[in-house]
Amino acid sequence: MSAENAIKLLSNPTRVAVLKWLKNPEEAFAGYSQLYPFEQYGVCASLIQDKAGLSQPATSLCLKVLYDAGLIEASKVGKWTYYRRCEPRIGELTRVVTQSLQEL
């Protein structure tokens, strides 16, 4: 991923918030409940939608952009989709942006 694409991806506050929430879902989604523990599959898309206050299509688009960039992983369980962070890819994004900024 180029630094320009990474910065564009992170320019959306909802996408950044989702990445933060998925870093520590037990804290971010305290008071919410889902069928499976967060550490088993991640966070259900419906919880992310509720916390973000977005429509289902807007939430799906946000998650698709993060998924397509490889920053989150998806697990389909029955009719539900659960999301978690992809730490190696987030580390790569951090290195690319940091290196690009150091070259300025």
Image: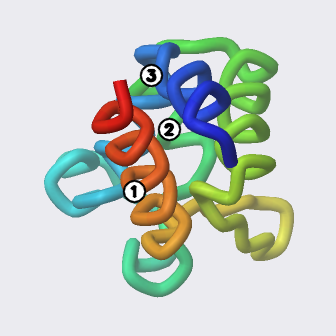
- In the rendered image, which quarter contains the C terminus? top left
Please tell me how crowded label 1 is: few (under 14), some (14-19), or many (20+) other residues with Cα within 10 Å: few
Q: Between marks 3 and 2, how big is the CA–CA gap?
A: 6 Å
Q: Amino acid at mark 2?
A: Ile
In the rendered view, does 4 fall on the left or right side of 18? Answer: right
Instruction: List the single residue furthest toward the bottom.
Output: 40
In this orientation, which residue lies closer to the viewer: 99 or 25?
99
What element does badge 1 sit on?
helix
**Can residue 90 be spotted in the picture?**
yes
What element does badge 3 sit on?
helix
Q: Which mark is residue 95?
A: 1
Q: Say whether marks 3 and 2 touch (CB < 8 Å).
A: yes
Percent across and percent down for residue 44 are: 57, 55
Q: Between marks 1 and 3, how big is the CA–CA gap?
A: 28 Å
Q: Amino acid at mark 3?
A: Ala
Mark closest to the chain's N terminus, 1 or 2: 2
In the rendered view, does 69 fall on the left or right side of 53? Answer: right
Q: Which mark is residue 48?
A: 2
Q: Quadrant of residue 22?
A: bottom left
Q: At x 48% / y 50%, what residue is drawn?
A: 96
Percent across and percent down for residue 29 are: 27, 48
Is residue 17 positioned above or below 71 on the image? Answer: above
Q: Between marks 1 and 2, how big is the CA–CA gap?
A: 27 Å
